[in-house]
């Protein structure tokens, strides 16, 4: 045994190694770190992992979809004999390249675009399978565009509701509109916290000049004030830091490496007055990190929290890290353009779903 | 939505700013830093730059008015510098430090001079290191150098805070990121083996051990605070020296009676770790700052979070009261701190004192009413000046008046909570104030108008001006008692019940305050305690209650909405008096001195800001300029007043 114990197992301690847990790196097939990093983060979002494995157990023989490939991959990690090692997500990547043209190459992709695609695509697969299995009966609204379909487990995990309130400055009428979200995309400011970025996300903006608001009450375009706040807080709150900005001057996207601190625990300040669960307390469970100087170069890694300690997944490599090293991924305070390792997508999990 | 600040926030820094007492000005010639500034840029990941001061007694200048005896120590990277500090006057030649040290393989993280034993030619200085060791040096006498925890047998983790025990010649307290706090005697050895401990005392969320050896050795005591491995970020002794406030990464503030080692109270952050802590100069309030970007004010006497300050854009790294700008009410400030807490007989005196103060405040409101319309004017109450610096590179100054801190914990309108409770609606709380108040309340979460609510609430009381002074006294006495009893109730009851208790109190604020509150408190005395005899031992039984609720303390979702952690709209939210960007790097230190305040920055610079009237030269200025007299200088709308830039 002794010689076979990996450095990671030694770092964790054989007796401390969580039972039924596996830490497997994912082999890179040429710039697939955008996928590897997101998949690792999702694997350690426990509610998501459990639902994917449940799906695997329920759907023995179906035609291959991106979801079956993901389920096979998660199942394969979860049932490994060894506790640590690496695995090649070959089938998943092949399927991904078939599913979406943009990913069918060896170029670096945006991890957030991939996450967004994956979540939405999985959701569509579930909805499609549901309508197939229940062609007539079941949910009356399945084919009815008027009423929303019954939420899938993807909704249950990631979906929150934003409510946008608009107050017409002419008639003072307040109208509000709800929209679903799977993640919140926030602008980043130098030397701020994610808390502040979220607060800015919900700042009141004035709609004026070219951007006036069509007020139903006044039946005309009017100046108005608008703000977006969170009405339903999701079980897993995914926060995308908008670190790639198009700069006209350079005619390309540049990376914004601003230092944005993110706490291990989070509550939202920007909830609406009628929010269902405004006190929800979140734990940081995973972070996708972008390393490098620009959107189309560089590397993605992820850090995840598992059983109280932190792990760093860099493609096929896995290391235990001290929680204090998380501060290395907040960003840079200096504006000199250089390479940085910065938090890019944060996954906060509500503590009441454990 | 916020617009991206291109250029990365390189907007102009403030070199001066105005508050109600005058203009503060950066003394550009009083800048201290490492003498050789080459390569003085990258500070990523290194320890925070902290500053320690000592004033050496000078036989030629017994009052210290010339400030010749001031010495300053700061750390930067692997280096430690000690300079003669000349305050607002031009800095000394940076190439001539009193002492400098360069360490290998470790960084100094914190330091503290012993003011008690300092003489004209000696100033013992403790230095803690990132690798856990502690050094005692004398930068003036130079011959002293002792090491503690040298072989890291006591603790291997980073030293996060180090302080001499107040008034002690040889005892000091050290906290580590391992979540442990050790008491050392500088005269004792640390031994050549790892210490064996035996349990000495334990309570809710903490345990204290002593060394299990025959001969006395270091550490004398080991305090384990919070969950295992939960970093202690800072601790602070109360001004009287008898209480110790400790803040940790688990988001808890814990306040101990230092000598008896009893936990006397605690609070929980809104979220994330608490990073810094300080006491008000009169020992009545503990202020903490943390990863929730908030400044949280906790009342020592009421054992509850009484207000939060919102103004920083990132984590709050240092909080400090400005004792020179804090003005006290008509009574003598309570410098005894907590002593009355341990002596049950004094409790009544304390309530009485509080009641007196509140009625004085009301009287002030009354007499000013004609001249200022519906605006609330404060006179006679204590006004604390608090400062805070943050990783957002900004300084915030806060004026905190006691009338705000006196607000009972109030459940603001939140329909979402309706399912679980009988929370009163906003209209009930502020009855008589009409639609404007309700309007504010509806928006309060977004617009931070809670201040206004509180003020209107107070003026609402005033409206029913048939409240005689004696009625007010009764109300306030009962009020604070009620809160204590309600706080006591947490131990035995579930969340829903205490909410109802609070709402009983709230409903009283409608037509006739005093009677209903008295009634409800009477109810509580019987229901919560089942006996009315132990009113005098409130503090004692509160500790008992704390012990019983360890499960509540472990579950942050059960703490929300309690005295430990009110919901965000359940306690007053303060706005800063001023909020100024002072640096390009995160600020790491804030010290208020008589003629100036001092800030330090992660890039290794220590800045001195002259107080109003002190920028020319300290000798010509009378001291009244920086001690505003609240009687002659009533100010309005304190908490939302924002002064303009120059």
Image: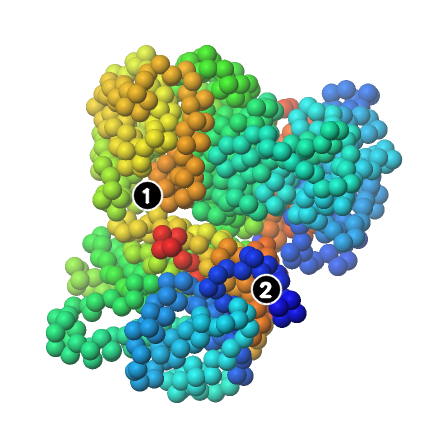
x and y percent of residue B625 in the render?
59, 27
Are the residues tagged 1 and 2 within 8 Å (C-beta)? no
* Any part of residue B320 in sight: no
Q: Is residue B204 left or right of residue A143?
A: right
Q: Residue at x 23, y 26 (%)?
A: B510
Q: Is residue B138 left or right of residue B403?
A: right
Q: Which residue occupies the foreground of this view, B143 or B589?
A: B143
Q: Is residue B196 left or right of residue A274?
A: right
Q: Is residue A249 left or right of residue A11?
A: left
B355, above or below B154, in the image: above
* Any part of residue B99 in sight: yes
Of all chains, the one bearing label 1 is B
Colour mapping used in the image = rainbow
Dot 2, how many residues are within 10 Å of its Cα: few (below 14), some (14-19), or many (20+)? some
x and y percent of residue B281 in the render?
56, 26
x and y percent of residue B173 in the render?
66, 34
**Quadrant in the rendering for residue A140:** bottom left
Q: Residue at x 45, y 47 (%)?
A: B271
Q: Residue most toward the front?
A: A1
Q: Which residue occupies the foreground of this view, B635 or A29?
A: A29
Q: Secondary structure at mark 2?
A: helix
Residue B444's tag is: 1
Q: Quadrant of the C terminus of chain B?
A: top right
Of the two numbered discs 1 and 2 in the rendering, the one whose residue sits closer to the viewer: 2
Residue A9's tag is: 2
x and y percent of residue A168 in the render?
24, 56
Q: Secondary structure at mark 1?
A: helix
Q: Residue at x 86, y 36 (%)?
A: B142
């Amino acid at each position: 045994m002794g010689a076979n114990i990996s450095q990671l197992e030694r770092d964790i301690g054989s007796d401390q190694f969580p039972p039924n847990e596996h830490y497997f790196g994912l082999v890179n097939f040429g710039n697939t770190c955008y996928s590897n990093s997101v998949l690792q983060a999702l694997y350690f979002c426990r509610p998501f992992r459990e639902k994917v494995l449940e799906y695997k157990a329920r759907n023995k023989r179906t035609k291959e979809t991106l979801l079956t490939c993901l389920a096979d991959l998660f199942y394969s990690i979860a049932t490994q004999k060894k506790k640590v090692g690496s695995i090649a997500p070959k089938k998943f990547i092949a399927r991904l390249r078939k599913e979406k043209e943009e990913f069918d190459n060896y170029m670096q992709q945006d991890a957030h675009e991939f996450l967004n695609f994956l979540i939405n695509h999985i959701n569509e697969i579930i909805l499609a399978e549901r309508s197939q299995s229940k062609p007539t009966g079941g949910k009356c609204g399945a084919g009815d565009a008027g009423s929303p379909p019954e939420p899938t487990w993807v909704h249950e995990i990631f979906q929150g509701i934003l409510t946008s309130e608009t107050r017409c400055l002419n008639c003072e009428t307040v109208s509000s509109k709800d929209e679903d979200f799977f993640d919140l995309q926030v602008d980043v400011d130098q030397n701020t916290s994610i808390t502040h970025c979220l607060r800015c996300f919900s700042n009141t903006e004035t709609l004026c000049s070219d951007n006036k608001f069509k007020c139903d009450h006044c039946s005309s375009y009017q100046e108005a004030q608008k703000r977006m706040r969170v009405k339903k807080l999701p079980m897993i709150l995914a926060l995308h830091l908008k670190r790639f900005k198009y700069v006209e001057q350079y005619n390309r996207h540049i990376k914004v490496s601003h230092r944005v601190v993110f706490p291990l625990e989070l509550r939202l300040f920007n909830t609406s007055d009628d929010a269902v669960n405004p006190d929800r307390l979140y734990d940081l469970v995973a972070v996708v990190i972008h390393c490098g100087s620009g959107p189309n170069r560089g590397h993605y890694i992820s850090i995840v929290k598992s059983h109280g300690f932190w792990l760093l997944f860099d493609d096929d490599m896995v290391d235990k890290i001290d929680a204090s090293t998380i501060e290395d991924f907040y960003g840079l305070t200096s504006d000199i353009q250089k390479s940085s390792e910065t938090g890019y997508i944060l996954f906060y999990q509500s503590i009441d779903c454990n | 939505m916020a617009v991206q600040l291109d250029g990365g926030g390189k907007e102009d820094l403030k070199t001066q700013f105005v508050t109600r007492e005058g203009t503060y000005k950066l003394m550009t010639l009083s800048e201290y830093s490492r003498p050789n500034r080459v390569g003085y840029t990258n500070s990523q990941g290194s320890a925070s730059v902290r500053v320690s001061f000592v004033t050496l007694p000078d036989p030629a200048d017994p009052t210290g008015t010339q400030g010749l005896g001031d010495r300053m120590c700061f750390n930067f990277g692997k280096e430690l510098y000690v300079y003669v500090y000349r305050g607002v006057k031009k800095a000394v030649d940076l190439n001539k430090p009193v002492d400098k040290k360069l360490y290998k393989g470790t960084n100094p993280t914190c330091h503290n001079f012993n003011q008690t034993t300092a003489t004209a030619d000696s100033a013992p200085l403790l230095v803690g290191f990132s690798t856990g060791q502690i050094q005692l040096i004398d930068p003036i006498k130079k011959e002293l150098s002792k090491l503690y925890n040298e072989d890291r047998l006591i603790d291997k983790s980073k030293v996060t805070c180090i302080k001499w025990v107040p008034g002690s010649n040889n005892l000091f307290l050290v906290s580590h990121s391992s979540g442990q706090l050790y008491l050392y005697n500088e005269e004792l050895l640390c031994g050549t083996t790892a210490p064996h401990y035996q349990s000495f005392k334990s309570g809710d969320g903490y345990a204290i051990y002593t060394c299990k050896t025959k001969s006395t050795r270091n550490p004398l005591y080991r305090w384990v605070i919070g969950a295992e491995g939960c970093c202690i970020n800072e601790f602070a002794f109360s001004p009287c020296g008898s209480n110790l406030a400790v803040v940790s990464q688990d988001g808890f503030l814990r306040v101990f009676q230092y000598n008896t080692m009893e936990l006397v109270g605690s609070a929980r952050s809104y979220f994330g770790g608490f990073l810094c802590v300080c006491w008000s100069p009169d020992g009545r309030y503990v202020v903490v700052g943390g990863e929730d970007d908030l400044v949280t004010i906790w009342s020592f006497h009421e054992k509850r979070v009484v207000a939060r300050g919102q103004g920083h854009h990132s984590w709050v790294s240092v909080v400090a009261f400005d004792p020179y700008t804090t003005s006290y009410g008509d009574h003598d400030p309570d410098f005894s701190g907590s002593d009355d807490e341990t002596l049950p007989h004094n409790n009544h005196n304390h309530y009485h004192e509080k009641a007196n103060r509140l009625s004085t405040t009301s009287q002030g409101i009354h007499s000013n009413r004609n001249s200022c319309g519906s605006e609330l004017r404060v006179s006679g109450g204590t006004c604390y000046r608090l400062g805070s610096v943050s990783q957002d590179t900004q300084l915030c100054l806060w004026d905190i008046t006691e009338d705000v801190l006196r607000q009972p914990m109030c459940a603001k309108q939140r329909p979402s909570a309706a399912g679980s409770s009988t929370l009163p609606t906003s209209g009930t709380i502020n009855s008589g104030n009409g639609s404007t108040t309700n309007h504010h309340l509806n928006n309060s979460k977004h617009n931070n108008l809670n201040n206004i609510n509180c003020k209107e609430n107070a003026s609402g009381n005033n409206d029913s001006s048939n409240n005689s002074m004696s009625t007010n006294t009764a109300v306030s006495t009962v009020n604070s008692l009620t809160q204590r009893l309600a706080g006591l109730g947490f131990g035995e009851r579930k969340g829903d019940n205490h909410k109802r208790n609070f709402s009983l109190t709230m409903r009283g604020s409608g037509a006739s305050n005093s009677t209903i509150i008295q009634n409800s408190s009477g109810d509580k005395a019987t229901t919560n305690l089942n006996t009315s005899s132990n009113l005098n031992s409130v503090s004692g039984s509160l500790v008992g209650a704390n012990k019983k609720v360890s499960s509540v303390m472990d579950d942050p979702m059960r703490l929300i909405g309690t005295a430990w952690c009110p919901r965000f709209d359940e306690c007053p939210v303060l706005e800063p008096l001023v909020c100024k960007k002072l640096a390009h790097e995160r600020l790491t230190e804030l010290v208020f001195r008589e003629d100036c305040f001092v800030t330090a920055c992660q890039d290794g610079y220590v800045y001195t800001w002259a107080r109003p009237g002190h920028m020319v030269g300290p000798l010509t200025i009378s001291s009244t300029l920086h001690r505003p007299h609240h009687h002659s200088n009533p100010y309005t709308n304190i908490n939302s007043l924002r002064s303009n830039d120059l």
